[in-house]
Image: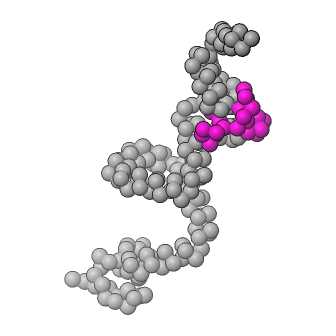
Amino acid sequence: MKTKLCSKCKRNLPLSHFNMSRVTKDGLRTRCRKCRTADQRDYRSRNRDKVRKSDKIRMRKYRLTTHWKKWSKTHGKQYYKKNKKRQLQKQAMFRKNHPAKARRINFRANLKRKGYGITFDNYMLMLKKQNGRCAICGRKEKIRHYLSVDHDHQTGKVRGLLCTPCNAGIAFLGDSFDRIESAFNYMKSTNE
């Protein structure tokens, strides 16, 4: 069995312990996998900001490629199925350690999934215009951490942001002006 000397740990190791390289004559890296991994881990911990920035740029470019889009559709789901338990544990740990950030991520995903046609930035702009309060009752949301997006079910047009009770009230009355007016008249007549 052929061996090679690692330039860092100075051990003679089988060739299978070295990654490939286009630069060297023998086609293998000068350091063994363990030493290279340790060096990379050390470098990444010392230069965390620099590495994050370069990783972001590299991934942004890569995600624009068609290869990534095809791969993520097929392999992403397969990977999740194979590692579902591990992925759920990671998600739970993230939610526990970063509750505010997890809520924000979840909220953005819900906005996208429900398809109201508004982005998170649009939502935040509407929230600012309404001073963080419900468009009907003027109270802050107490049940959830964010106001619900009220929209017309026929046209899909977003009308405003409502607290959970007001949003549910409109939904139960079927978005009908006649029913809302009848409910108003009923409330008025019973309070006299």
- Work out whether residue 26 or residue 80 is closer to the camera in this orientation and state it: 80
State left or right for residue 79 relative to residue 42.
left
Image position, residue 33 (x, y; %): 38, 77
Image-based side of 165 in relation to 32, left or right: right
Say which residue appears at 38% left-offset and 91% top-offset: 10
The residue drawn where x is 51% and y is 78% is 42
**Is residue 110 shown left or right of residue 152?**
left
Q: Quadrant of residue 183?
A: top right
Instruction: Examine the image and state in which quarter residue 176 appears.
Output: top right
Picture layout, residue 11 above or below residue 131: below
Expressed as whole percent of the image width and height from the top left, the position of residue 15 reads: 30, 79
Give residue 31's position: percent from left, percent from top. 41, 82
In the rendered image of this protein, does residue 168 appear above or below residue 90? above
Magenta range is: 127-148
Q: Quadrant of the C terminus?
A: top right
In this view, the residue in front, 109 or 49, is 109
State which quarter of the image contains the N terminus: bottom left
Quadrant assignment, res 21: bottom left
Whether 134 is among the magenta residues is: yes
Q: How many marks?
A: 0
Q: What residue is shown at x 55% (from left), y 32% (from top)? A: 114
- The residue at the point 35 percent across, 53 percent down is 85
Query: How would you classify the magenta stretch by its main secondary structure?
Result: loop
Q: Residue furthest left?
A: 1
Does residue 28 appear in this view?
no
Residue 83 visible: yes
- Does residue 127 lie above or below 28 as drawn? above
State the colouring used for the structure image. Answer: one colour
Image spot of residue 70 (x, y percent): 43, 44
